[in-house]
Amino acid sequence: MLSPKVSAILVTYNQADFVQEALQSLMDQDWDNLEIVISDDASTDQTWNRICELCEAYVGLKKLVLLRQSNNVGVVGNLNSAIAAATGDLFMLAAGDDVSLPTRCRESCEVWLASNGLLDLVATDAYDMLLDGTVLNVKPIDDLQTWTVGRWFFCRPYHFGASHLVTRRVVEMSAMRHDLSAEDQVLMFRAIVSGGAKRLAKPLVKHRRGGVSTGSGPKSYEVKRHALIVGAQRSMVESEQILTDARICGVLDECRMPLEASLQLQHFVVAMLHAASYRERFSLLMGAHGVPLSKRLRFYIFSSNAWLYKMKYWLRATLQSNS
């Protein structure tokens, strides 16, 4: 396949200030056999209008496919809709606030072609970009070609979903759950256990800072507790998705133990943080034998001593306001 058809998937949500630059960067790709699928997740700002303005003014040869969700379905739900509408052999994923360099698609495809189409994922390095567009330095990803299933469970590789080129076969391996918080690690796992993943050691995406990456951390005990519960619930969903994918790929025996341990831990965390009494929390502490004692104690202490942590956050806020 000398020139595979690529579907550039742009998923957007409330990114009015950045979406035209992101979309224009896909229109400017120097790969001819490219369609651009834009899927907006029911943005409440001017994102959709900005998308339509740029598409109406476009005079190039690339096919544009526009989708708009009637209600917010989340990152992965939005991505699934875009993938269902795409016709490419490969999918180049992009976010509505990042910028792809003009050669990104071509250079990623060249890496894939050099593998005789065996690879299932190619990811590039990225530039670190501030909200105002200022580019700081290069953010290299990990050497993905060295990752094995066992290593993936021990340490997740550092990479960016918005720099992925993935095959149709890995995307269609099974339906990705809409309640996943992100798709990047799921696609990486699938690639590792199938055709493999590879790093393209060149920054071909300007990765914009924003959201949680620039947050200052929880301001109160209640916010921290909520974040722990949400994080555990998201981990449960991801582990359940990976369990399904491991079964499909025939690597369930290799993955079952770490996945079941992860699920056990996350169920324990949610139950402990929702427990209504000291008796219930103590029962969970003593009964969750599959969870390491250090982790049981950590969450038991956090859940049982809310007053102490509330004092800690109050003291921190007071010191910061006086500094």
Image (spheres, helix red, strand yellow):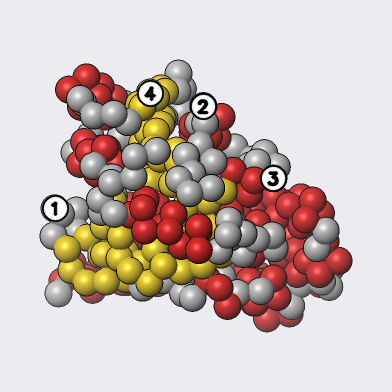
Q: Which residue is mark 2?
A: 85
Residue 173, labelled with which disc? 3
Q: Is residue 246 left or right of residue 129?
A: right
Q: Secondary structure at mark 4?
A: strand
Q: Mark 4 or mark 2: name the one nearer the start of the chain.
A: 4
Q: Nearer the viewer, mark 3 or mark 1?
A: 3
Residue 191 appears in the picture as rendered: yes
The Cα–Cα distance between marks 4 and 2, rounded to whole angstroms, is 9 Å
Q: Which residue is mark 1?
A: 132
Near-viewer residue (95 or 266): 95
Q: Quadrant of residue 163?
A: bottom left
Q: Which residue is mark 4?
A: 66
Label 1, residues with CA under 10 Å away: few <14, some 14-19, many ≥20: few
Q: Mark 2 or mark 1: name the one nearer the start of the chain.
A: 2
Seen in the picture, residue 83 relative to 297 is either above or below; the reply is above
Question: Are discs 4 and 1 less than 8 Å apart at CB?
Answer: no
